[in-house]
Amino acid sequence: MSGIGAAVLVAALVVTAAVAWWLRSRNGALRSASAQEDGAVTGQNAVFERLGVRPAEADLTVVQFSTAFCAPCRTTKARLQQLQATRPGLAYVHVDAESHLDEVRELDVRRTPTLFYLRRDGSLLGRSSGAPRPEELTALVDAHVGAQAGGELA
Amino acid sequence: MVSVPETSPTTSTPPRGVDVRGPRFGAWVTSVVLVVALLTASGLLVALQAVVFAVGAFAGLRYAPYGVVFRLFVAPRLGPVREREAEAPPRFAQLVGLLFAAVGAAGYLLGTPALGAVATGLALVAALLNAATGFCLGCELYLLVRRALPARTLAR
């Protein structure tokens, strides 16, 4: 039996457990965008505008960055499209990260899926990376998409 | 109703895709192989695992050895396919596994067992994470690497 091998094996198990725990707690968790400088916000809005995001047209706009090699991106996209179909106040914009690398750098997108949540006034409610749990995503959307009957009346 | 600009459509999903349980099964087998390789410091075993990764990455998951075992012997006992996924993510994961395994095998076989063990250990972390949680480390790191590349080229 190899001593180095056994030591590396133990280390690998510890690292795996730590990463799994980190992912569980971090994936999809909303980080709010309160502590931002004005300049950064203006820059961010310009980036979103370049991507064709029009927050003024919906109560909540969700912008998702994905890559082709990302399986959770696909499930998250399907979930958001489903939510969008039943909630008129929700807009959804899907961005292929690889073909928008400049925007990826400017917004500091590191993992996929990364989601940005924008209010109607264009301000950033927050961002999250990793696939959100379905019930948490639904709750977040419902908390910010007008629960009023405006959709049906219009 | 809000019109949504589709900035860029995702890569077209193949109509069928792979049974999600296949790559998970493969990740468990890979983990066992790598654990045995670490404990016996066997460069040959890591090299064999590298070949398995290479087949999956370059020929496609249809031909990946553990995938074939899964289809022929495991899937028939598990019942019908409940969920399918696109092939691209798990196939890319095989490529990342190949990188680690190739370094690991080279380390062992060329006389630097410490390098061999560390690279094999990293491959094990990726395989175990994938097996236990379905998380794909290579897929996550892909964007980080991709967005760093042109910048690095400029810096040179």
Image (cartoon, coloured by chain):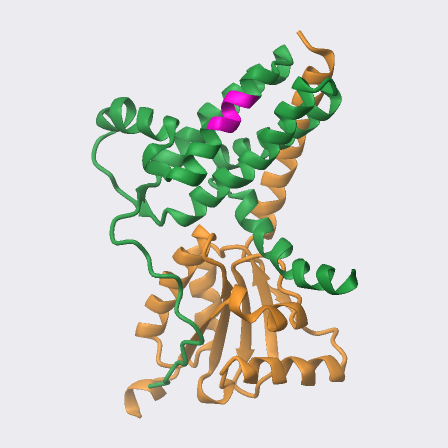
Chain colours: A orange, B green
Q: Residue furthest top?
A: A1
Please give the name of the residue rendered at 49% of the width and 33% of the height, measured from the top-left corner: B132
Which residue is pictured at 43% across the width and 40% down the height? Answer: B58
Residue B50 lies in the magenta stretch: yes
Residue A36 relative to residue B65: left or right: right
**Where residue A120 sits: x, y (%)?**
52, 86
Foreground pick, A41 / A68: A68
Observer-nearest residue: B144 or B134?
B144
In the picture provided, is B44 more to the left or to the right than B113?
A: left
Q: Nearer the viewer, residue B114 or B134?
A: B114
Q: Quadrant of residue B25?
A: top left
Residue B103 coordinates in the image, percent (x, y): 64, 30
What's the residue at 31%, 92% (across, down)? A154
The part of the image, by quadrant, that contains residue B82 is top left
Magenta stretch: helix, strand or loop mostly = helix
Q: Is residue A68 visible?
A: yes
- Identify whether B107 is placed above or below A24: above
Q: Is residue B119 magenta?
A: no
Where is A115 relative to B113, above or below?
below
In the picture, the quarter occupied by the N terminus of chain A is: top right
Indicate the position of residue B112 as horizontal and vertical percent values: 74, 20
Residue A10 in sight: no
Q: Is residue B114 above or below residue A29?
A: above
Total residue callouts: 0
Query: Horizontal and vertical percent for residue A139?
Result: 45, 65
Magenta region, residue range:
B47-51
Residue projecting furthest to the bottom: A154
